Image (spheres, rainbow, N blue to C red):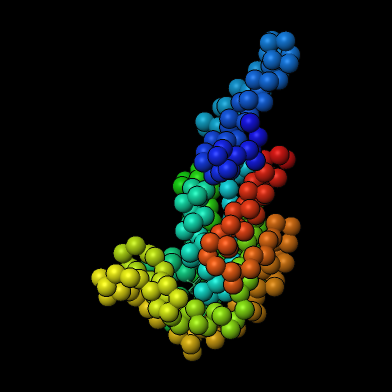
Amino acid sequence: MFLDDEFDGVPLVRIMGLKRLRRMTRRQRRASNAASAGGVVSKELRSSASASSESENTTKCSSDDETLKIIIAGAPASGKGTQCEAIRSKYGVVHLSTGDMLRAAVSEGTDVGRAAKDYMDAGKLVPDEVIIGVVKDRLSQPDCVSSGWLLDGFPRTPAQATALKSAGVSADCFLFLNVPDSLLIDRVVGRRTDPITGKIYHMTFSPPDDDEILGRLEHRSDDTEEKVVVRLEQFHSNVDAVRGSYEDIGAEIDGSLSPGEVGDLIDSVIEEKVAAKTAA
Ligand code: AMP
């Protein structure tokens, strides 16, 4: 079995999850090493095998190489939310949207929320010192350590990228959804969210066909034409520097395609990165 194998046309990594697949591949490799040594497992092999299985059981907090870690970047309404939901459910990673985290902090009235609110209302970036600590703390929590993560909306400035690096946090791939500004403004202004399911709709391109859902849709206070101009300015003034920090793992995706087509492109990038990582 190889990490880029498929079953019924579906990549095994998607069916089994990266951690399980890697564990099985390692076990298989050990078994075939043992067999090629005439069925006698050498002392060295036994001790490395037991060290490896011990570390599988005991070092969850340092399972960096075992889990999938993805950063997704793109302008407001570039389609990150829709794609993140698909990535989360396919690959079992924890989705961390800094926009969602900050909105939750604002509505709970926490210190972070109070420090962030005015910036968010103005469509401006929250100061680095407010958001960096929040993200670093969240990434070190057990669910992220054991399942891997999908970081959405962070890093958004060079200082945030540097802070991640200094904290020893690295990713397997950096996906950049590229969409022209002219499309983004229409997408932002018509965007609505269902507060119950979290599903994102667009009043023109993809309205809900259920009146009950239509009646409860929410319009984000920063999804207006006036605020999106500021948000796009902030995005354009930082994006090149942030992308530059991840050149070695970066992939640009045409975000103006349909959500399904974008999703297929993202899958092929993730699967290629996973295969490269596991072959290393
Ligand atoms: P989003 O939901 O990603 O569009 O983010 C909504 C708002 O949250 C942004 O306009 C910023 O005010 C704030 N925000 C989210 N992520 C960050 C970040 N990484 N750095 C600074 N501000 C952020």
Between residues 147 and 1, which one lies in front from this camera angle? 1
Between residues 79 and 59, which one lies in front from this camera angle? 79
* 161 lies left or right of 135: right
Residue 231 is situated, as x and y percent measured from the top left of the image, at 54, 81
Residue 105 is situated, as x and y percent measured from the top left of the image, at 39, 68
Query: From where the camera sits, is residue 118 visible?
Result: no
Q: Residue at x 63, y 68 (%)?
A: 254
Q: From the viewer's perspective, is residue 23 above or below residue 270?
A: above
Query: Extreme left residue here?
Result: 212
Quarter of image, res 196: bottom left
Residue 233 is situated, as x and y percent measured from the top left of the image, at 60, 83
Q: From the viewer's perspective, is residue 217 above or below residue 143?
A: below
The quarter of the picture where the C terminus appears is: top right
* 19 lies left or right of 46: left
Between residues 104 and 32, which one lies in front from this camera angle? 32
The quarter of the picture where the N terminus appears is: top right
Q: Residue at x 45, y 76 (%)?
A: 205
* 280 lies left or right of 190: right
Query: Extreme bottom residue here?
Result: 226
Quarter of image, res 129: bottom right
* 56 lies left or right of 113: right
Q: Residue at x 69, y 16 (%)?
A: 34
Residue 168 is situated, as x and y percent measured from the top left of the image, at 64, 52
Total labels: the figure holds 0
Query: From where the camera sits, is residue 54 visible?
Result: yes
